Amino acid sequence: MAAIIRPFDRNSKADIQLLESICKESGSKAVAKERGYVNRCVWETKKIPDQLWCEIYNDCAFYMAVRRKNYVRLVFIVVRADKRNNGIGTKLLNRLFERTVKSDCTQVRLRTSQAAGEANAFWLNKQHAEVVGINGNDLELQINLTQ
C-alpha cells in the first residue's frame, strides 16, 4: 500500500477521534492515558492554528507538534501497535524535521519519561538529543537540526 500522508483537519471531529483512537491503539498505557491531550492542543492553538502541526500517516500514525518562537515542541509521535517496526515513525519524524528547518527553526524539543529506557535510548543515541532539563519524572530533550 502506498503511503498517504495528509494534514490533520482541526475542524474535523472525525480527525480528532482518529488521533485519539491511534493513541488508544498504540500499545502504550501512558500514550493511551494522555490521548485527551490531543483535544487540548487543538483548543490551545485555536487562535493561532498555523502553529499546530499535525500529519496523519495512512490513518494509523501521526505526529503533532506546536511551533513556538524559537523551537518546535513535539507533543506526540504515535504509531498503532500493529504497524510498528515498519519505519513509519521515522518517516513522520523526518517530515517534522524537514518542516522545522523550512520554517527557519533549528530546534525540536520534547518531553519523555526518565523511565522510558528504550525510547530515551532512541532519542539520545540515534537522534542525538541533549537533556536540557528535568521536570519531575520527565526529561526535557532538545534536538539541534544544524550540525
Image: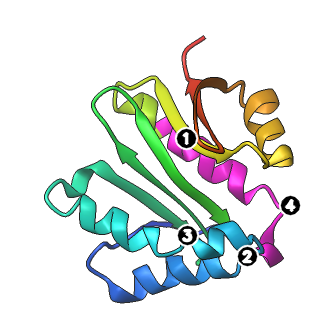
Q: Which residues are magenta?
A: 81-98
Instruction: Left or right? Give the position of 46 relative to 120.
Output: left
Tell me the colour scheme of the image.
Answer: rainbow
Residue 109, given in percent of the width and then of the height, sits at 51, 35
**Picture quadrant where residue 126 is located:** top right
Q: Mark 2 and mark 1 in contact (Cβ < 8 Å)?
A: no
Q: Earlier in the sequence, mark 3 or mark 4?
A: 3
- Nearest to the eye among marks 2 and 4: give it: 4
* Foreground disc of the pair 1, 2: 1
**Element under disc 4:** loop
Would you place residue 116 above or below residue 80 in this image? above
From the viewer's perspective, is the residue at label 1 or at label 3 nearer? Answer: 3
Camera-nearest label, 2 or 3? 3
Q: Amino acid at mark 1?
A: Leu
- Seen from this angle, which residue lies furthest front? 136
Q: What residue type is disc 2 on?
A: Met
In the image, residue 13 lies at what x, y percent?
A: 34, 87
The residue indicated by pointer 1 is 110
Q: Secondary structure at mark 3?
A: loop
Q: Secondary structure at mark 2?
A: loop
Counting residues from the N terminus, which is met first, the one under dot 1 or under dot 3? 3
Which residue matches tag 2?
1
**Vertical placement of 72 versus 125: above or below?**
below
Against 44, residue 125 (above or below) is: above
> Of label 1 and label 4, which has the lower sequence position?
4
Q: Is residue 107 magenta?
A: no
N-terminal-most mark, 2 or 3: 2
Kindly identify the residue that appears in the image at 72 percent across and 31 percent down: 127
Q: CA distance from mark 1 to mark 4?
A: 21 Å
The dot on residue 34 is 3
Q: Residue placed at 24% from the left, 52% from the top? A: 50
How far is the residue under mark 3 from the one under mark 4? 22 Å
